[in-house]
Amino acid sequence: MNKLLDLIYNSNLLYIIRIIIAIICGFAIGFERDYKNKNAGTKTHGIVALGACLCMILSAYGFPNYQGDPNRMAAQVVSGIGFLGAGIIFVRRDKNISGLTTAAGIWTTAIISMAIGAGMILLGILCTLLVISLQWFLSKLKFKFFEHSEEIVYINTLNKDFDFEGFVNLLEDNNIEILHLETDKLNINETYMQLIVNLPYAFSKWDLNKLLMDFTGVKSTKI
């Protein structure tokens, strides 16, 4: 038994096992991203895990007679993955930033794989479970103090009584963000408006309807 363990420890089989475990951990993290239709999924996370783990193995064990610091190779993985993550982050048309969680997940996957490559297998597996928990379960929880909901609003206004600037100020004063606005003059007396608004938490569509109907010049609303 001891000879078998020595054979495993002194052969490449030990490194191969670490690489396989790192790939599995990468697949597990990437699967959650695939499930949510994100840009980087199982393939990307798996390849990153393989590369980071192999780089760590080379750094730690590949140059036993090297007099310098072979761990400098592993240090470049952390910064190198940053460039990959930067390609995933982009700003959408509504000025919201997308891809931050996925980029952070790829970066963390690389570090987890480095830990596995260094022999800290249980630590790597534990951190994998923690990442999946953060990405999956916490996204299911609604942080109500920060939650917003989008609503489409249709409004008919009376031109002579409606104050457009005052209307916009009313929405801003109630922390209602206007994402999109279109107007169409129906006749000399009435104007049709279509808005897409972002409602803050605890502000329901019924609250919005009452707020709009109480504003001078609003004839009718539909949400």
Image (tube, rainbow, N blue to C red):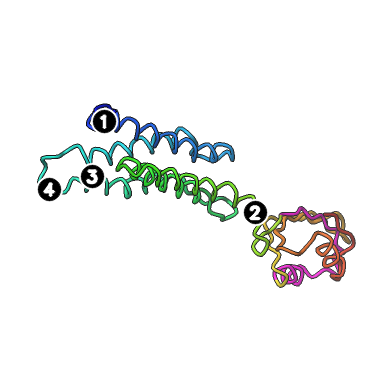
The magenta region covers 150-172
**Residue pointed to by mark 3:** 73
Q: Nearer the viewer, residue 120 or 80?
A: 120
Q: Are the residues tagged 3 and 2 within 8 Å (C-beta)?
A: no
**Structural distance between the alpha carbons of marks 3 and 4:** 11 Å
The three-letter amino acid code for the residue at tag 2 is Leu
The residue tagged with tag 2: helix, strand or loop? loop
Q: Position of residue 168 (x, y in %)?
A: 73, 67
**Residue pointed to by mark 2:** 141
When the figure is inspected, residue 158 is found, relative to residue 105, above or below; the finding is: below
Q: Residue at x 28, y 39 (%)?
A: 55
Residue furthest front as drawn: 1
Q: Is 152 included in the stretch rendered in magenta?
A: yes
The three-letter amino acid code for the residue at tag 3 is Met
Q: Quadrant of residue 212?
A: bottom right
Q: Position of residue 210 (x, y in %)?
A: 86, 66
The residue tagged with tag 3: helix, strand or loop? helix
Classed neighbour count for the residue bearing mark 1: other residues with Cα under 10 Å, few (<14), some (14–19), many (≥20)? few
Classed neighbour count for the residue bearing mark 2: other residues with Cα under 10 Å, few (<14), some (14–19), many (≥20)? few
Q: Is 58 included in the stretch rendered in magenta?
A: no
For marks 3 and 2, the one nearer the N-term is: 3
**Residue pointed to by mark 4:** 68
Q: Nearer the viewer, residue 138 or 107?
A: 138
Q: Residue at x 59, y 40 (%)?
A: 36
**Structural distance between the alpha carbons of marks 1 and 2:** 49 Å
The three-letter amino acid code for the residue at tag 1 is Asn
